[in-house]
Image (spheres, helix red, strand yellow):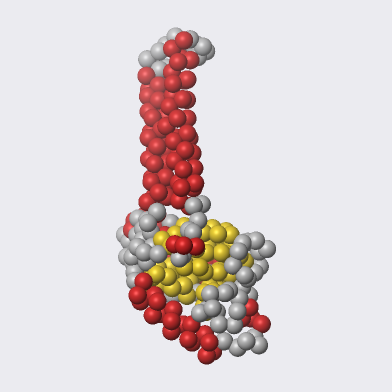
Amino acid sequence: MSGIFGVLSFFGSVVESLFSSIGLDGLSVNQSTDYWDITVPPEDISVHGHLIDWLFNYTTYMNIFFFVLVCIGLFGFTFIYHHKKNKTPHFTYGNKKAHIWTVTIIGIAVFIGIDATISTISNNDLKDVFLNWPKDKEKPVKIEVMAQQWAWKFRYAGADGVFNTQDDVVTTNDLRLPINRKVLFQITSKDVIHSFFIPNARRKVDAMPGRISRLWFELTKAGKYPIVCAEMCGTHHYLMGAKLITYTPEDYESWLGQAQKLAVQTNDPEDLNLYWGWKWE
Ligand SMILES: [Cu+2]
């Protein structure tokens, strides 16, 4: 390895050692030290992640296409009208019919092909999917999330189904979820603005003090995945990671049953730290 590849490989190993220092190594899909592997997106394990991927890819490829087109025009005309081949200068003001038509058609093509298309499709995705909140009759898993410098706390209502009571299951940097079932989060922050980001689910939302954000998704694959903070939130922002473990519905129920039992045995009702949650809104 030498030159630019050596430099890139160095940054790749720095990124990897950061991940291993926060215990996220082995959770990441890309475990190789090869720099180019980190350009591959993490495995999508959600029902609707492909909508985000489509938007991302379409925007990227369209940008590349028009960038190349503009470069061809720029360098092509520079070559064609080089002064050595065109001794007498020819002045044009771009006000001929052909010029105006060309500019108008390219402008409309960009507007309809990119701006209008991604606005319409992403707006429909928001309306039909991302802001189409699970109904109670669909029995979504409900989780409260508290972000703080520099950890994630998760709260499951205990057997009573009511949040912020003494039988709640409370975990730190450890989120367990079932697959094939909708999951609904209410998220806030204790101190500064953080961002709750699950790359494998392609979902992210800000966690803001004094305000509750919502997020829902449905996962499809059991395994271990990283959760990270995606908002620069202080000196240890890079350490603010948690792990997500996804189970089949049966495994999830047995884990939750055990966790609820353990919570009843170990939660100290006198400990005010237990009650950082809120009534589900
Ligand atoms: Cu943070």
Q: Say which quarter of the image contains residue 114.
A: top left
Query: What residue appears at the point 46 percent right and 10 percent down from the top-left corner?
Result: 97
Query: In this orientation, does residue 137 appear?
Result: yes
What is the x, y in percent for residue 50? Answer: 37, 51
Residue drawn at (55%, 59%), measured in percent from left and top?
Answer: 214
> Residue 210, how many percent across, how many down?
68, 63
Q: Choose between 32 and 81: the one closer to the eye.
A: 32
Examine the rendered structure and indicate whether residue 17 appears above or below residue 68. below
Q: Position of residue 37 (x, y in %)?
A: 33, 58
129, 38: nearer the viewer: 129
Quadrant where the C terminus is found in the figure: bottom right
Give the image location of residue 165, x and y in percent: 60, 79
Q: Left of 2 or right of it: where is 15?
A: right
Image-quadrant location for residue 20: bottom left
Looking at the picture, tell me which residue is in the foreground, 66 or 90.
66
Q: Quadrant of the N terminus?
A: bottom left
> Farthest residue in the front direction?
137
**Residue appearing at x 44%, y 9% in the figure:** 88
Q: Residue furthest bottom?
A: 265
The one nearer the camera, 204 or 110, is 204
Residue at horizontal 46%, vertical 82%? Answer: 259
